[in-house]
Image (cartoon, rainbow, N blue to C red):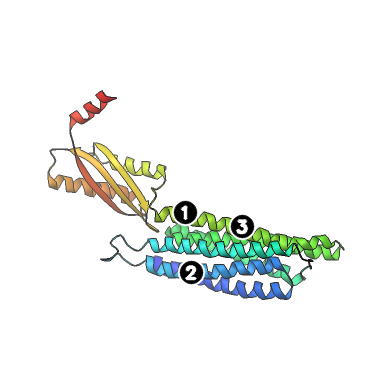
Amino acid sequence: MNRDRATRLAGWISTAANILLTLGKGVIGIVAGSEALFADGIHSAADTVASAAALSALAVSNRPADEDHPYGHGKAEVVASAAVAAVLFLAGLNIVYTAGHSFFLRPRAPELPALYAAAVSLILKEVLYRYTAGLGRKLNSPALKALAEDHRSDIWASWAAIAGIGAAVAGEHLQVPQLAFADPLAALLVGLLILRLAYTMGKEAVHTLMERNVDPHLLQEFTELVLSVPEIRRVDRLRARTHGHYILVDVRAAVQADKTIQEGHDIIRQVKAAVMNAHPEVREVLVHLNPYYEEDDRDRATSR
């Protein structure tokens, strides 16, 4: 299965599952009187929007480069990640506000079907997380990785809902009315988890959109690969940035000043091959060659 088809399938599966969970948890949460489950349903509604945004972005990001977008459309996935973060942030705020308000009201223990619904949600989200995370790593897709993290937050949210609903239900049977507060407390925890996830995802998306350099260890690997080409005498500068699911590398390297244009062209091809063969996620390596003179290194050593 090619990348485009695999990512589209994952997006559609996530969207369909989130719609099902939104309806199920929302309706059961209202009928069974569980704020925690209803909050989890709001989370799933936000996930539905997130999945739809990711699905749209994936369709765009897989388009080949064109005249208007010579570096490709990979950042569409990053934009989708930022949109997902924004939606989750708003959903988290709404849940925190609603749950906090409930502490000033008389609590009511939810009914048992709410606990069953939370358990089903936990199992489904665990399956979705494993599937989406594995595919996201395999295809190096920021949008799928964001969806996977979203599914993982749902797992924790479902655990919180199960704990809160279970404690509230147990409190009713044990004649401990104070335990009814466990349900809105779980809803509050779900909201805080969503806000934390939104912050983490949003920060990473902003860093990518601002074209932050890749990890220093990866830069060092690129530098060593460039220096592995025999004719390269020195790496003067190397930069790399993520562009969605692929990386673009810019390098300035020095070669002997007496090299011909043809020799320089061949060296550039060797540099590109060295980096791209070792790192398939690198889509382009832009190489600028500087002339190298022996006295340059002598002058540098003297000035130290």
User: Mark 3 falls on what kind of element?
Assistant: helix
Residue at mark 3 to residue at mark 1: CA–CA distance: 17 Å
The local crowd at label 2, few if under 14, some if 14 to 19, many if 20 or more residues have their Cα within 10 Å, is: many
Question: Residue 116 at x, y = what percent?
Answer: 71, 69
How packed mark 1 is, by other alpha carbons closer than 10 Å (few <14, some 14-19, many 20 or more), is some
The amino acid at mark 3 is Leu
User: Which disc number belongs to residue 193?
Assistant: 3
CB contact under 8 Å: marks 1 and 2:
no
The image quarter containing residue 121 is: bottom right
**Circle 2 — which element?**
helix
Q: Which residue is mark 2?
A: 11
Earlier residue among tags 1 and 2: 2
Taking the image as shown, residue 134 lies to the left or right of residue 73, namely right
Which disc number belongs to residue 236? none
Q: Are circles 3 and 1 on residues that touch, CB within 8 Å?
A: no
Amino acid on which disc 2 is placed? Gly
Secondary structure beneath dot 1 equals helix
Q: CA distance from mark 2 to mark 3?
A: 23 Å
Q: Amino acid at mark 1?
A: Glu
Location of the C terminus (image quadrant): top left
Q: CA distance from mark 1 to mark 2?
A: 21 Å
Q: Position of residue 35 (x, y in %)?
A: 70, 67
